[in-house]
Amino acid sequence: MRSALPPSFLALVAVLALVRPAPAAAQLPGIAVERRLAGELSLRVGDTLRLGAAPDSMRGVGVVAAIYEPRPDPAQITKQDRYVRMHLPDLARLLGAPDRVDRFGVALRPGIAPDSAAARLDRSAFGYQAYPSAAIASESSQTFLVVSRFHRAIAVITIVASAVFLLCVMLLKVEERRMDAAVMRFVGVRRRTIFGALLLEAAVIAVLGSAVGTALALAAGAATNAYYRRFFHTALTFSLITPGIVGFSVALSLALGLVAGAAAAWRLVRTRPMVLWGRG
Amino acid sequence: MTPTLIARDLRKDYPMNGETVHALRGVSLRVDSGDYAAIVGPSGSGKSTLLQLLGGIDTPTAGAVELSGTRLDALSDRELTRLRLTRLGFVFQRFHLLPVLTARENVELPMAEAGVRGPERRVRARELLDYVGLAQRENHRATQLSGGEMQRVAIARALANRPAVVLADEPTGELDAATGREILDLFLRLNRDGTTLVVVTHDDRLAAEAGRVIHMLDGAIRD
Amino acid sequence: MTGAAWAVKRLARQPLRTGLSLAGIAVAAAMLLDMVMLSGGIDRSFSDLLLGRGYQMRLTPKGTLPFDTEATIRGASAIVAALRREPALEAAGAVLGTSLYARRGDSLITLFAYGLQPEAQSLYQLQAGRDLASGAGAGVLLSEPAARLLGAGIGDTLTLVGRLDPQVVTAAAGRRLVVRGMVRWLYDYRGQPSVGMVLSDLQRLSSSPAEDRASMIVVKARQDSAVPGLVTALRRRFPSVEVSSVADLVATFHERLVYFRQLSYILGSMSLIVTVLLIATLLTIAVGERLGEIATLRAIGVSRRTVVGQVLAEGTALTIVGGGLGIGLGLATARYLDAILTSFPGLPAAFSFFVPRAGALAFAALVLLLTGSLAGLYPAWLAARTPIAATLRAEAT
Ligand SMILES: Nc1ncnc2c1ncn2[C@@H]1O[C@H](COP(=O)(O)OP(=O)(O)O)[C@@H](O)[C@H]1O
Ligand SMILES: [Mg+2]
């Protein structure tokens, strides 16, 4: 997977760090090391490193000035990349590429629209392209849009499957009462009373089922988060069960349960009691 | 006459809410080959219980049943099942046919279970349906038959594997007088053709026609 | 009459109930099939893509994956020449990938350019026109999106420029090349405007040619079985570059897309659970309704085995029919889901997440059949332990 647009800090990614305990010199360039990398290489503040852009050109030396925790970034979790940060002139010297950068950050005067500013820059640009931050943000969130579209599609399939399941179970549940309904009809209980009783039973089952389902979902969500946080070494949230989601699911299952229960109960009370009893 | 079915001092207790119901209090009985025996008695006197023990459907609390020299309590569950399949025929008050099957398929069922091959099965099922007077109904589903017709299919089913004894529990209990008469005639014809019959009944006509009448009262044979 | 025919008859007697169950099983089976396709499909599709032209190994800058960064290998020609002398190797070719610009009037159009060695290329399939000849100035190949963007076709001449210097507002390098052919680039994402030319042309356009840079060197061994050994040997011989076999790359990719695989396991298991629950519920209730029938069968001498077999056969019949419907549904939903996932930015258009393979289909079918049949175990056990006398008596009330 690769992007044709020359992307951002890629030169930084290529930097390799190798530990070389050396007497700490006063004027070595300081570098900040990502916590995981520091952990993997057992680095502490004050350690000295040899640095280079390739294994055959480990020309630079730096001293660990800080160990930092990167901001959790969903785009990075599946990658094995490790990061260090250093001052731009130090990196440029290390790469042998003086006065070259991947991108500039530009702050606009208040009141100037980023889109029109970028367009103006592009008109006079040569060898670079200006993007409003919003465009970059939307570009880099594209992956997550795709993932969430995928999740939505899966959710639709799941909802269809569980709706069918619910209809089926409700139908069976009500049909279990076939004999009782027949007896009640024989002794003269009104259809409406039987229908009400069956519907009440369906409603109780639907409510209980929703409660158990919500509890299960919360537990599964917590387990998912715990698992993936450990798996990807990140503080990101993977499963987010909002009150809105709970409300939607409960409302849907209640509605489906009641509709299915009502349909099945209706079918039952309309059948002749002799047929219910198994004769006729 | 050779004894086909022997019951020795049969007892059956049912535990009921801490108390014990003594359904049978020591019943001894002998049915010979070719007999037509009617068991009569008031409701609750233990007739059905006795029939179930004779047929190996249930096991006695004490006592023993012997069929053609085989003690039923000596058999494993599988052997007992096999014995019910091949040596006994059952007719129930409520017919108990399989509703998804046709008349012929209901009659074929015990033969299929006994491993009789398809063509042979079909021929014998047709013969039996013909015998009970339902030749033209062989492809009707059980649910499409009248009560009397269902009972005749049930009798044909009971005869399928040429049993040593046919046991029937109130076979006319669900039928009107005229239809019951047809079943009684069928039983008479069966017995005349050599089938050994033990029939539990409330029907005075049946008791009058049977060769032997066994009276039951309170879980015991009276007289 | 067989047990299966009997089971089908029974199911047909309750059309609404059976229909709903079948629908449920079909949706669950479709989901299962999709998830089985997803779990193995990613690796398979990636591997097929990488092996598309038979090159089993890649040399890339140390610590990087092919085209994952802008880093390059220096002195590529020397490495390629050394590789081509290896008797175990059939072919080796260097590739450089970078952005390039086409000049049209005053404006510059940004393109992606591949520089390659036509005699050993792993990147494209020729669609129309002629292939590149070796040697500088041989011309340029266009992808369909590039042709559209440039408004150019076979025989047209393009002005391509590189090494833009913003300070003096000039391009340090420029070149006029004739379009020779139209190609499909194997690793391009949908709509990517890519052009291809001989490596030395692109090196001159993008950097100082003396550095002889390449993004990747592709290597083809004569025998697949020799690849693991060759990878080890090449790693020892070229310690300053990354040597990866297709299997290595697939493994890395596997790690990156671990989420989808785990999702597929979880959702696949859920589908199985739903199937089992549906069938078990249906059969349990059906057995409950039929206890009298079962007791009768046992009374007239039908064995426990036959009774159990009947219940299991009913579960199997449901599974087979529902699963059969599910296959069609699954293939349709897989196409829909694949269309969503393949719109990932930067993903090669030729890539698929859901790959229908006979093996996957067979596996899904087998697992479904097994679990569907096992779902009948509990109701079958209920049927088997039905007490005969008591049930017959209860039925008579
Ligand atoms: N499963 C049972 N549990 C408790 N009591 C039973 C059971 N089966 C039969 N009985 C009792 O045993 C007695 C005999 O019943 P049964 O054999 O059905 O009589 P009959 O067929 O002569 O009407 C009755 O008092 C009945 O209540
Ligand atoms: Mg009785």
Image (tube, helix red, strand yellow):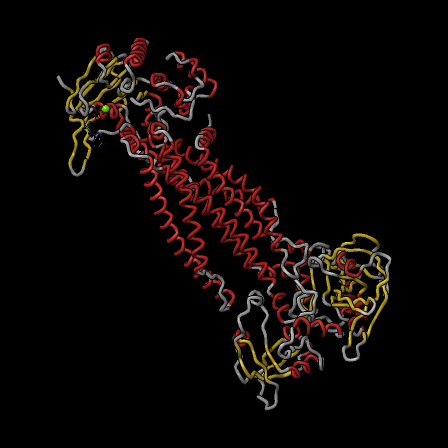
Q: In the orientation shown, which residue stands out farthest toward the front?
A: A111
- Quadrant in which residue B120 is drawn: top left
- Quadrant in which residue C104 is drawn: bottom right
Name the residue located 42 percent from the left edge and 22 percent from the top edge: B141
Q: Quarter containing ligand 1?
A: top left
x and y percent of residue A83 in the render? 59, 74
Name the residue located 18 percent from the left edge and 36 percent from the top edge: B16
**Is residue C262 shown left or right of residue C381?**
right
Q: In the orientation shown, which residue stands out farthest toward the left?
A: B223
* A210 relative to B48, above or below: below
Q: Along the line of sight, which residue is nearer the eye, C238 or C162? A: C162
x and y percent of residue B176 in the render? 29, 16
Q: Along the line of sight, which residue is nearer the eye, C133 or B100? A: B100
Name the residue located 54 percent from the left edge and 77 percent from the top edge: A38
The quadrant of the image that shows the N terminus of chain B is top left
| Whether residue B162 is visible | no
Q: Along the line of sight, which residue is nearer the eye, A246 or C57? A: A246
x and y percent of residue C337 in the render? 59, 51
Name the residue located 62 percent from the left edge and 52 percent from the top edge: C339
**Is residue A107 shown left or right of residue C166?**
left
| Whether residue A33 is visible | yes
x and y percent of residue C50 in the render? 68, 57
Q: Along the line of sight, which residue is nearer the eye, B88 or C175? A: C175
- Quadrant in which residue C154 is drawn: bottom right
* A32 relative to B100, above or below: below
